[in-house]
Image: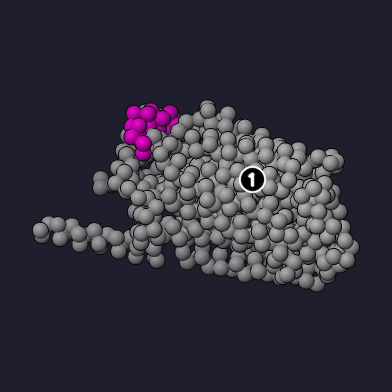
Amino acid sequence: MAGFAISNSDDGPKQFEGKITFYVVLCGIIAATGGLMFGYDVGISGGVTSMDDFLQKFFPKVYVKKHEVKEDNYCKFDDQGLQLFTSSLYLAALMSSFLASKTCKSYGRKMTMQAASIFFLVGVVLNAAARDLAMLIIGRILLGVGIGFANQAVPLFLSEIAPVRIRGALNILFQLDVTIGILIANVVNYFTSTIRPWGWRLSLGLAGVPAIILFLGSLLITETPTSLIERQKLDEGLAMLKKIRGTEKVELEFNEIVHASKIAQEVKRPFRNVMMRSSRPQLVIAILMQVFQQFTGINAIMFYAPVLFQTIGFKNDGSLLSAVIMGSVNVLCTVVSILLVDRLGRRILLLEACVQMLISQAAIGVILQLFMKATNTLHQDVAIWVVVLVCLFVSSFAWSWGPLGWLIPSETFPLETRTAGFAFAVSSNMLFTFVIAQAFLSMMCHMKAGIFFFFAAWIVLMALFVVFLLPETKNVPIDEMMERVWKKHWYWKRYVDHVENRNRTSDVEVATN
């Protein structure tokens, strides 16, 4: 299937030739396994923390509160240590993302993915064999380092190998694997919860499977041409570009990457440059996409779905089964995003989702406010409606803010600040994931049903952000964003114009001297 991308130059529009090759699709599927690691961990945490055997061993106070009939429904799981079990991973991922940025730049995207799988595997072993809380937390920290490395390398890898017209779909394979990982974790938890007393160890230990797949698969895939050229391996980069595009006619795209690489080589301190005024549009959007993604409330629901469903009255098996249903919706609707993102564009998916998420969150809040008291349980019919609304919320997130939160930052930075800029995106995501994971159960205890109105208010801000500040990047080559996006945006162009005017002034001064 042949295709092309338009490249602007002094000689007018030109075409990047290329096909959607089987090898590119294979590389994308293997690399996206990094998302499977991330998703499995997100899904497994909530299920494990609802298992009695796990709570008895590590959090006996929570176990007692859970089974105390008079305990406030909203506060059964309010324990900082229990929240630290979930959130410590994301704090580690935050810190490691900056190291991963340097690894990506110096050693390539492929080696960074291999390092991610090794860190993750060591963490899995410690978690599955944990004898005390300290061993459990250390394992979680190593898992976090693996997640930080994988989330830095995989979206960049996918964006750089993809032909422009399927860049969105190929990049969203990462998020698709995240959702598949969550679903698999929910299914695993459903069955291991009946294995007494070591079912939780099996749940945690099976996290090693996607890490092994990523490590072995990474031995088969290529490094991206951009990374090879960036590291001055021009012949290898040219050969690999021909291979992944399925054609010998890659001179235009190769020259574009070489040109971007030369500019990048002149930047000695990319983290300083990404903070400059000229990089502000991409940096602000990358960070805000991560902040808003977390303040939809999605990870609060994903982390603690079984806990949430137990709170509204489901028994343990029922809560885990509800989480499986929710995970299935998550996977199916991420496929919708793959099919539509390069046809409809990014903005329309984000805006539609804001409306659907707002309605869902507000409706859940109203139901809990009216029917959920401190010590009662919801009537079964009402509880089922809560599950339906949660699934509506998850579906809209799955085709919008979930995958696009990773896609948009990975495709908007120029090469000279790409790894550094994306490191800020990853670290922002991990920071606010940590905040939500550490705070959600306490927030639910103190705010009760109001927590859903809290997230609904954030969704209104997200919609305004998309309307006024987020440009459309559909079908724009990754190295043409400056000319075709930022210089034409009603607000962000002032930052580009500022830099161009400053450069013109400098040129005049040099000529005068």
**Colouring method of the image:** one colour
Q: Quadrant of residue 16?
A: top left
Q: Position of residue 481 (x, y in %)?
A: 39, 52
- Whether residue 89 is in magenta: the answer is no
Q: Position of residue 119 (x, y in %)?
A: 58, 38
Chief secondary structure of the magenta span? helix
Q: Position of residue 179 (x, y in %)?
A: 65, 46
Q: Give the residue at mark 1.
A: 138
Q: Is residue 280 above or below residue 209?
A: below
Is residue 105 or residue 339 the one in the foreground?
105
Q: Quadrant of residue 174?
A: top right
- Say left or right for 43 vs 466: right
- Toward the left, the furthest residue is 513
Q: Position of residue 151 (x, y in %)?
A: 54, 45
Q: What amino acid is labelled 1 in the image?
A: Ile
Highlighted magenta segment, given as a residue range:
229-245
Which residue lies at the image location 34% right of the left edge and 28% below the top edge?
235
Q: Is residue 23 above or below residue 481?
A: above
- Whether residue 232 is in magenta: the answer is yes
